[in-house]
Amino acid sequence: MIELVSSERCINCDLCVQVCPTNVFDAVPGDNPVIARQDDCQTCFMCEAYCPVDALYVAPFAEQQIIVAQAQLEAAELLGSYRRSIGWGIGAKPAPDQSFRLLRGG
């Protein structure tokens, strides 16, 4: 489930708003998009995959919300980890062994 939009990293491109198949986000003119309908998140990771600046964190738990701290996510390199694991982004390479890391959170 989507848990975080980093206000420090987000560049307000609204790609997450555009690619979300369940309309979880609301665009805010001149500001970061907001998670408006978190319970509608299907944990598809599309928003995280398309985020060009790794500003999103989707937890692998589809049925429950969890409390996250951005500093801990950054320290564990979890912001944008799905995007990196599928080989998207500058200099990224697919790393199939990373899927286990995503599921166990570190």
Image (cartoon, helix red, strand yellow):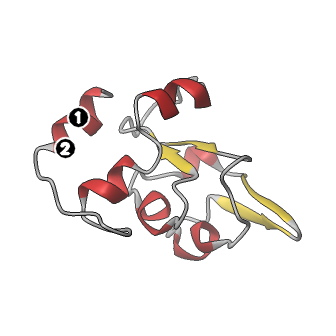
Query: Can residue 18 be seen by looking at this rendering?
Result: yes
Using a 10 Å C-alpha cutoff, classify the residue at mark 1 as few (fewer than 14 neighbours), some (14 to 19) or many (20 or more).
Answer: some
Q: What element carries label 1?
A: helix
The total number of labels drawn is 2
Q: Name the residue rendered at 19%, 44% in the picture.
A: 99
Looking at this view, is 95 or 47 the one in front?
95
The spot of residue 26 in percent (x, y) is 75, 63
**Contact, mark 1 vs mark 2 (Cβ under 8 Å):** yes
Q: Name the residue rendered at 36%, 59% in the picture.
A: 83
Looking at this view, is 34 or 49 the one in front?
49
Residue with the mark numbered 1: 101
Left or right relative to 70: residue 61: left
Q: What element carries label 2?
A: helix
Residue with the mark numbered 2: 98
Above-or-below relation of 36 to 26: above
Residue 4: quadrant of the picture: top right
The spot of residue 68 in percent (x, y) is 56, 26
Identify the amino acid type marked 1: Arg
Identify the amino acid type marked 2: Gln
Residue furthest to the left: 97
Above-or-below relation of 5 to 104: below
Q: Name the residue rendered at 67%, 60% in the picture.
A: 25
The spot of residue 27 in percent (x, y) is 77, 67
> How many angstroms separate mark 1 from mark 2 (CA)?
5 Å
| Residue 65: assigned label | none
